[in-house]
Image (cartoon, grey):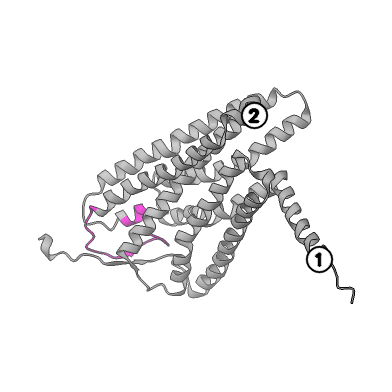
Amino acid sequence: MESNQTTVTDFILLGFLVSPEVKRFLFGLFFLLYTCTLLGNGVILGLICLDSRLHTPMYFFLSQLALVDISYASNTVPQMLANLLDPAKPISFAGCITQTHLFLMFALIECLLLVMMSYDRYVAICHPLRYTLLMNRGLCTALAITSWAGGSLLALVHVILLLRLPFCGPREINHFFCEILSVLKLACADTWLNQVVIFVACVFILVVPLCFVLTSYTHILGAILGISSREGRKKAFSTCSSHICVVGLFFGSAIITYMVPKSRNSEKERKILFLFYSFFNPTLNPLIYSLRNAEVKGALRRLLRKERVVPSCIPRNKN
């Protein structure tokens, strides 16, 4: 019986089931947001690389987060933009699996990086005198490598379990990219093991890290309230408020997507939630860190001032 089954070689991404006029509007909107994502995170990366005052553990992790956000968006958005212009264009099976792997990998890396950043803030505020000793360059590099390696390996586990499944039709994925739960619905076999592994991964990669982050910020809040000067409390809180916003956006949308029971409108709701991963989170992250962070704004002003001063230093020809 299995010999009569046809192996699927490509998939059709249904994307957003709206009129052609709305698709053209969405193409323009998403293209604009994608451009802002690349520019915003690119500016963050450039400032951190060029300004020596930002060569600290906090901004080292922020540069890693910006790099992940660029990769995150670039994995899903170009395919979605192409799909809005040509909905019938298929994506190959290998391309779909690759997209699934990269999406999971960058999501897991971002999750781990946010935990590392919360630990950095905990040490900076609760143990300021030992900060430079504890958060040295070697430890920061090791934590970043752990995040990238851990996210890559965990994503690979999901993909290996996905590749063991047969796909014999249908070909239509009701999503705007190859999201793992949507791909699993097309498998011609029982996917209980995949579902269990995904749930267990959510517990250990979302719930446990979120508890760690909340514990860190409980200690941070106690330390901030213990600061006598109002200016000191304000400065300490400003270094954490940006990270709290990013953590809330990321973990909130992820937990609702993978751990909340499904509803009747689950497909539409999931697509909207995944827009936070693909667009809003990567776009908002640099805005949150730049608008709420005086050091980033100061670095940008110094860079712009330097660019205006350099041309004026060129001597004029007296003749």
Queried whether the magenta region covers residue 165, the answer comes back as: yes
Q: Report which residue position mark 1 lands on.
A: 314
Q: Is residue 268 found left or right of 286 in the rendered image? A: left
Q: Residue furthest left?
A: 1
Q: Nearer the viewer, residue 230 or 191?
A: 230
Amino acid at dot 2: Ile
> What residue is at 34 percent from the left and 44 percent from the top?
198
Q: CA distance from mark 2 to mark 1?
A: 45 Å
Q: Quadrant of the C terminus?
A: bottom right
Q: Is residue 304 visible?
A: yes
> What residue is at 78 percent from the left and 29 percent from the top?
230
Query: Over which residues does the magenta segment extend?
Result: 164-183
Checking the image for residue 132, the label placed there is none
Q: Nearer the viewer, residue 51 or 241?
A: 51
Q: Residue furthest front?
A: 319
The percent position of residue 101, horizontal first and vertical second, equals 37, 53
Checking the image for residue 125, the label placed there is 2
The percent position of residue 184, horizontal first and vertical second, equals 30, 54
Task: Please identify the quarter of the rendering in which residue 166 is found.
Answer: bottom left
